[in-house]
Amino acid sequence: MPLVAYLTKKEFIKMINIYDTINQLEQDLRKTQEYLDLKQAYETLKQDGEAYQIFKDIRQMQEEMQAKQMQGTLGQEDMEKLQALGQKVEEFPSLKELMMKEQVLSMIINEAHAAMMKPINEMYQD
């Protein structure tokens, strides 16, 4: 049964307001200079075929490793493969630039996440 089936009308309206706020946050994030810089870096990266392929390989490997980590099957060999791919980043300025821009945007996202978690963290501060 969906979550909304358990909510009162007032609770449902509050929930909608929260989702409206989340959707607005997503739209606001797209307007930040940090996001626009990342988007431009990505477009530049796609122009460099070899760098773009390394980028896709890294993303695929990260997804595979995340799945393995959740299954408890992540091994040393996996870490070495990722490290070897990571070293290739240094060879491609467009890929290095993209990763730096992503890191900057991630800091903003982490701050937003921390703000959303603040009520829970404060509640647990007995």
Image (cartoon, helix red, strand yellow):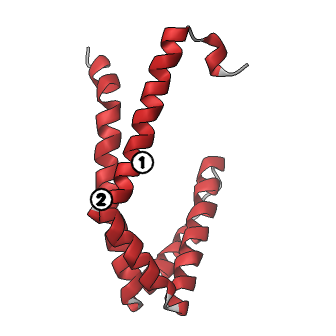
Is disc 1 surrounded by few (<14), some (14 to 19) or many (20+) residues within 10 Å? Answer: few
Find residue 25 and report its horizontal and vertical position in percent: 37, 44
Residue under the image location 43 percent in, 26 percent down: 17
The answer to whether one can see residue 89 in this image is no
Find residue 41 and report its horizontal and vertical position in percent: 38, 78
Residue 40 image-quadrant placement:
bottom left
Residue under the image location 54 percent in, 91 percent down: 50
Along the line of sight, the residue nearer the viewer: 71 or 57: 57
> Circle 1 sits on which residue?
26
The amino acid marked with disc number 2 is Thr
> Circle 2 sits on which residue?
32
Find residue 67 and report its horizontal and vertical position in percent: 64, 54
Residue 90 image-quadrant placement:
bottom left
Q: Is residue 122 above or below residue 46?
A: above
The answer to whether one can see residue 66 in this image is yes
Using the numbered discs, state the Cα–Cα distance from disc 2 to disc 1 in whole angstroms.
Answer: 10 Å
Along the line of sight, the residue nearer the viewer: 52 or 63: 52
Contact (Cβ within 8 Å) of mark 2 with mark 1? no
Along the line of sight, the residue nearer the viewer: 93 or 6: 6
Find residue 3 and report its horizontal and vertical position in percent: 63, 20
